[in-house]
């Protein structure tokens, strides 16, 4: 069945994601965000490293449930579509070890930048998306700035790599 | 109609189910792939923007009518202007570098994309940095403008003075522009 194995068009996934958020509003009566559970998990890891032993696990709340469910759902989605494959990096260009090093550095730098942004603005990207649906001005500013900055960086990198290739 | 008052255990069970649906949808939308996100940010394909725009258009409308029916009573904070702006700019740079948000990176890692683990480790590493700079950050949040006022719910949807309707109209216009100007990826499968 192609609709289970292939990618879905925007007019299918968009409405389903909107329904997902609307149902989450009704079920939890708040914007579903993950910033809180990431903070608790990191504090737990930090405490365990400092004490040199595993602490008692942090209290499980519904946001942890959302994290766990996302992992299960994504895994199921990739297994059903037959696309599950271990990948150390993405893209075809680049020499093997350099490609991996680039992937590690970009992942680490990107992770730090995105989490700093989230901490500064007070909620996760998912939380801001839900906040935007609930008409929070701060969430709209965050999302607009995020996509504008992301596009600016991507286009700048694209031009830089294009200029480098044409210079070779 | 009232918001569903689930007990804590039922809330966790419902969240796991919701997460499973969300994770599955992220994979189906191809949002778990760095390549797809970076291509969209480089304006090489329009499917990510069209998905986000349709989701926001219908999500704003859904939240409006759910609130009007009494199914949603919670309000969200208006946020602060400069922290939201600078936070968004930093998050955008991070989105380009690692190719995912926390939730899409988690979904990507679950589908075998090991490179997203580096992004998740980077996100965890950001916390000590935030702890050390927290004093500065809280001062900054307090001094970089006052809290933005929340938008009060309107009674009528189809009204230009309703910010939700105005935004939806704007997003529909953006959807048309994105559809016409940016190249289509042809909804190709993996």
Image (cartoon, helix red, strand yellow):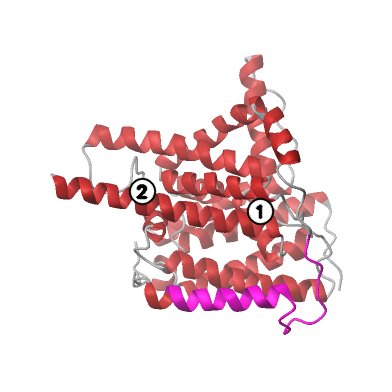
Would you name the residue on which mark 1 appears? Answer: A127
Q: In which quadrant will I find the C terminus of chain B?
A: bottom left
The number of numbered badges drawn on the structure is 2
Which numbered dot is residue A107?
A: none
Of tags 2 and 1, the one toward the viewer is 1
Mark 2 crowd level (few <14, some 14–19, many ≥20, 10 Å Cα)? few
Figure quadrant of residue A57: top right
Check if residue B155 falls in the magenta segment: yes
At x 59%, y 45%, the residue is B87
Q: Chain of mark 2?
A: A
Residue B178 shows up from this direction: yes
Q: Which mark is residue A85?
A: 2
- The residue stretch that appears in magenta: B150-178
Vertical comparison of A110 with A152: above or below: above
Task: Please provide percent x and percent y for residue B86.
Answer: 59, 45
Looking at the image, which is closer to me, A20 or A118?
A118
Identify the element where label 2 is drawn.
loop
Q: Are both tags, 2 and 1, on one chain?
A: yes
């Amino acid at each position: 069945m192609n609709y289970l194995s292939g990618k879905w068009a925007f007019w299918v996934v968009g409405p389903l994601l909107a329904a997902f958020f609307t149902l989450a509003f009704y079920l939890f009566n708040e914007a579903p965000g993950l910033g809180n559970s990431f903070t608790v998990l990191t504090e737990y890891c930090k405490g365990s490293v400092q004490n040199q032993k595993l602490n008692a696990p942090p209290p499980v709340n519904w946001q942890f449930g959302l994290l766990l469910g996302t992992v299960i759902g994504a895994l199921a989605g990739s297994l059903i579509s037959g696309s599950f494959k271990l990948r150390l990096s993405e893209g075809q260009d680049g020499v093997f070890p350099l490609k991996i090093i680039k992937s590690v550095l970009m992942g680490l730098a990107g992770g730090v930048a995105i989490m700093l942004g989230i901490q500064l603005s007070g909620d996760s990207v998912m939380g801001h998306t839900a906040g935007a649906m609930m008409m929070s001005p701060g969430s709209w500013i965050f999302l607009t700035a995020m996509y504008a900055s992301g596009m600016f960086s991507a286009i700048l990198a694209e031009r830089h790599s294009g200029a480098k290739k044409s210079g070779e | 109609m009232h918001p569903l008052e689930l007990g804590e255990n039922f809330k966790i069970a419902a969240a796991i189910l919701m997460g499973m649906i969300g994770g599955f949808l992220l994979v189906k939308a191809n949002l778990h792939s760095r390549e797809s996100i970076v291509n969209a940010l480089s304006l090489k394909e329009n499917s990510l923007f069209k998905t986000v725009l349709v989701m926001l258009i219908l999500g704003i409308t859904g939240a409006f009518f759910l609130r009007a029916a009494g199914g949603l009573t919670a309000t969200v904070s208006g946020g602060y202007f400069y922290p939201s702006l600078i936070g968004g700019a930093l998050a955008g740079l991070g989105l380009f570098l690692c190719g995912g948000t926390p939730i899409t990176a988690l979904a990507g890692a679950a589908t075998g994309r090991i490179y997203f683990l580096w992004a998740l480790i980077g996100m965890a590493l950001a916390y000590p940095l935030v702890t050390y700079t927290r004093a500065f950050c809280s001062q900054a949040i307090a001094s970089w403008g006052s809290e933005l006022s929340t938008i009060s719910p309107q009674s009528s949807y189809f009204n230009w003075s309703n910010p939700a309707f105005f935004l939806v109209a704007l997003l529909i216009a953006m959807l048309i522009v994105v559809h016409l100007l940016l190249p289509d990826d042809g909804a190709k499968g993996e």
